[in-house]
Amino acid sequence: MIRAKLVLRNVISKPLRTAIIILSLAAAAFAALFCIAGIHSAQNGLRDYFRSNYGDADTIISCVKGKIQVEQSDLPAGSRVLGVAISGFRKTVPNEQYFNYVSLISVNVMGMDTKLAHQMGMIDSVFPTENGATITQVVAQQFDKKVGDTLEFEGEDGKKYALKILQVVPATRFMKNFPMSIVVTPELSNEIGDSENGSFHTIYVDTPNDKISENMVLLSQKYPDHIFISTDSMDSDDTMNSMLNIYYLIFAVVFLMVCFIVVSMSKHIVNERMSVIGMLRSIGGSIRGTGVLLLSESIFYGLCGGVLGTILFLLLKNNFVLGLF
């Protein structure tokens, strides 16, 4: 009872110092929870991004120069390969802000097997591409087009094309990466881009799970001029590591700041308590008992700071904290 009264008196006697210590410890608790939750949020967010945009595809292969040389025979048995041929065109539309001006808009022409893309979970449905094109809602809005209209443009080969719009789709899943796009057959995309027939700019591979790492190593050795990205090894990805390093840095800075403040305050507290410790010792108090007095005061600060930091985190995490990155 006497110790409890002494602790309460010591805490109340210096309210400003008590507030600084509790707020510092609250900041440490808040930073710890923020970083722990943030790390998992970043990892899960990146996993969800790849899963949503690339479906079952676990390897993305591209080539900086020339044609992709990877063939089906280079991949493990049971692998599914989706090739995407990318070309494009430019069209002008009236500028909404300036009456006498026009805006030049670039449009991607994506050539792929939409049935296979749907089976791999990369698009929501099979896009019709025979004798026409599927366009995104973004393209439809830009050119004021709807299903049944004709989209006219000039390809990279200088030839004029007029494609019937077969379907308008939202820019979701894989198409989220290319919102300003139309989808056609691979053959037509290569023709528009004046590329060799059968060439692909990017291929997406669904490899049996136990063969992913082995397949990546073998392919990178055989084709050193190709770029291989694994959607299943995100934890070692440079982007992932950069994001995690930000959380570690935030926690380290806050933790060092809190340590400096708390240690400085603790030295003053111990010096002030020497008279109380001496009094307790003179009336027969034990060393352990006097130590418990100081420890009880520290526990009080720690509990108050930890609870305050936790409450602040729970109040802010959904609206701000986890959405920060």
Image (tube, rainbow, N blue to C red):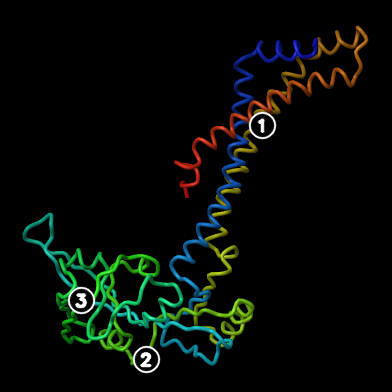
Task: Label 3: state its secondary structure.
Answer: strand
Residue nearest the observer in this picture, 110 or 279: 110
| Residue at image point 39% right, 85% down | 200
Task: Label 1: state its secondary structure.
Answer: helix
> In the figure, 135 relative to 305: above or below?
below
Q: CA distance from mark 2 to mark 3?
A: 24 Å
Residue beneath label 2, please? Answer: 198
- N-terminal of the pair, mark 2 or mark 1, is 2
* Quadrant housing residue 238: bottom right
Which quadrant is home to the N terminus? top right
* Quadrant housing residue 196: bottom left
Mark sitting on residue 236: none
Contact flag, marks 2 and 1 (Cβ < 8 Å)? no
Q: CA distance from mark 3 to mark 1?
A: 66 Å
Label 3 sits on what residue type? Ile
Q: Nearer the viewer, mark 2 or mark 1?
A: 2
Tell me where residue 157 appears, x and y as whole percent. 22, 87
Q: Nearer the viewer, mark 2 or mark 3?
A: 3
Label 2 sits on what residue type? Gly
- N-terminal of the pair, mark 2 or mark 3, is 3
| Residue at image point 57% right, 54% down | 244
Tell me where residue 199 appears, x and y as whole percent. 38, 89
Task: Label 2: state its secondary structure.
Answer: loop
Q: Is residue 21 left or right of residue 321?
A: right
Tell me where residue 230 appears, x and y as whole percent. 54, 73
Residue beneath label 1, please? Answer: 260
Residue beneath label 3, please? Answer: 165
